[in-house]
Image: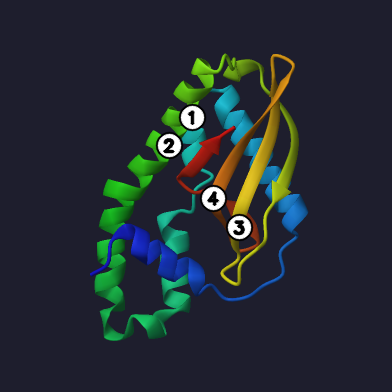
Amino acid sequence: MKTASALLTIVTMTMSSFTVKYSETSEKMAQDVVSAFQHNSPQEFVTLFPTLQEFHQLMDETSALYGDFLPEAKKEFASEYENELLPEVREAFQHILIEGKKKGIDWSAIEYIRTEVGKISSAKSASVTVFFQANGKEHSLRIENAMTIHEQWKVSQYLDLK
């Protein structure tokens, strides 16, 4: 079977189409991301990542890709979700906290400024950049492969602080 990253890519690339209020839901996600960093809370950040149930529902929606192997694929993905994906999300959050502290960012005092969404792919994913202020200086946190699931933006474990 494929790794969690490969399964995540397949699931993301095959999501059904729907209309999303991109600016509203991406801004809500961005404000929730800022809140997680203000509270120094990896768990708060993890709640912004797609749940296992959401991934399983997407797998059900694209069951033709898995054929008779859907139950096995869901079971394997569940294991990889718990053992690989969620730890990667927590580690990415912690890495950004540390990187920010090195840049002099007092995370508890950051203020949300705005959100920019990159080109949205056919898989309903994009890079989302969250701009925030710390100590009078503007910073940005880029979330690569942020995705929409059921008309809501979700974070990924691919973060970059500028």
21 relative to 6 in the view: left or right: right
Q: Position of residue 57 (x, y in %)?
A: 46, 69
Residue drawn at the location 43% of the way across and 28% of the way down: 94
Q: Residues within 10 Å of mark 3 (few under 14, many from 20)?
A: some
Dot 4 amino acid type: Glu
| Chain-order first, disc 4 or disc 3 | 3
Q: What separation in Å lies between label 2 and label 4 (alpha carbons)?
A: 12 Å
Residue linked to disc 2: 92
**What's the amino acid at mark 1?**
Ile
| N-term mark: 2 or 3 | 2
How many numbered dots are placed on residues in this image? 4
Quarter occupied by residue 162: top right
Q: Residues within 10 Å of mark 4 (few under 14, many from 20)?
A: some
> Label 1, on which residue?
96
Give residue 30's quadrant in the image. top right
Q: Which mark is residue 126?
A: 3
Q: Which residue is tagged 4? A: 144
Tell me the crowding category of disc 2: few under 14, some 14 to 19, or many 20 or more residues within 10 angstroms, Cα based. some
SS at badge 2: helix
Residue 22 in percent (x, y) is at 73, 57
Residue closest to the eye, 83 or 130: 130
Residue 84 position in % (x across, y down) = 30, 48
The Cα atoms of the two marked residues, 2 and 3, are separated by 18 Å
Mark 4 → mark 3, Cα distance in angstroms: 7 Å
Q: Amino acid at mark 3?
A: Ala
